[in-house]
Image: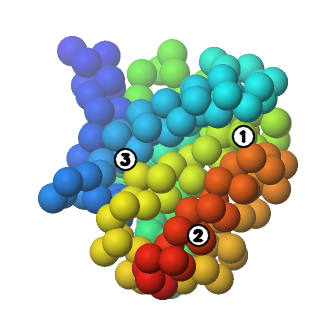
Amino acid sequence: MEIIKRLNKMYELKSVYRFTSVGDRKESTAEHSWSSIMLADYFMTTLGIKVDRVKVYELIMYHDLAEIETWDIWANDFEWRKNKKELELKAMKKLSDEIPVVLKDKYIELYNEFEEKATLEAKFANAVEKIDAEIQCIFVKKDWEWWDEEMVENIKWIHYKEFPEIYDLCKKMINYCKENKYF
């Protein structure tokens, strides 16, 4: 039962909600992880990006687990974001003692690699994870009401610089938002 308890701790990600909408409710972080993995698979397949697929999937799968403790820190919550890295690092350390012991070192390693963008896989996983939210809510105008083009540039574009195709896709979505008066 101890293993079940520790596995169940990771399942708590299903009840952490994000800003983006899914129908008439908010998306869970677990759903965001799933759609980011699907998006990564799409980009790796269509763009021919040469990265270790399994590593990318694992980086995406594990990096948001800290949100079980911190919840999702929304991009527009500037006060809370000031301490985001500290809060998430503290949460990761706490959580690493609560998940299955056999996953502890792997979780810490993947979390750090993702946060430090230490590898091409981590940079790619970051880019995919960041654009996932825009793709998720591109046709949900109310989810954009607190965004403007400058915020997208300042918060998101830095993650796309090594992946021009993802950067171009983001630019197209921004143009769509401008044309449809989202901003």
Q: CA distance from mark 2 to mark 3?
A: 24 Å
Q: Which mark is residue 124?
A: 1
Camera-side residue of 90 and 15: 15
Q: Identify the residue at image location x=33%, y=26%.
A: 6
The part of the image, by quadrant, that contains residue 52 is top right
- Most foreground residue, 166 or 65: 166
Q: Tell which tag, 1 or 3, sits nearer the viewer.
A: 1
Q: In the picture provided, is 180 more to the left or to the right than 124?
A: left
Q: Nearer the viewer, mark 2 or mark 3?
A: 2
In what quadrant of the picture does the N terminus appear?
A: top left
- Identify the mark nearer the N-term, 1 or 3: 3
Which residue is identified by label 2?
174
Q: Amino acid at mark 3?
A: Thr
- Is the residue 100 above or below the residue 139 in the image? above
> What residue type is disc 1 on?
Phe
Give the answer, above or below, for where 161 lies relative to 145: above
Residue 112, quarter of picture = top right
Of the image marks 1 and 2, the number of the one nearer the N terminus: 1
| Residue occupying image coordinates x 59% and y 71% | 175
Residue 63 is tagged as none
Identify the element where label 2 is drawn: helix
Residue 117 on image: x %, y %: 77, 46
Disc 3, SS: helix
* Disc 1 to disc 2, C-alpha distance: 20 Å
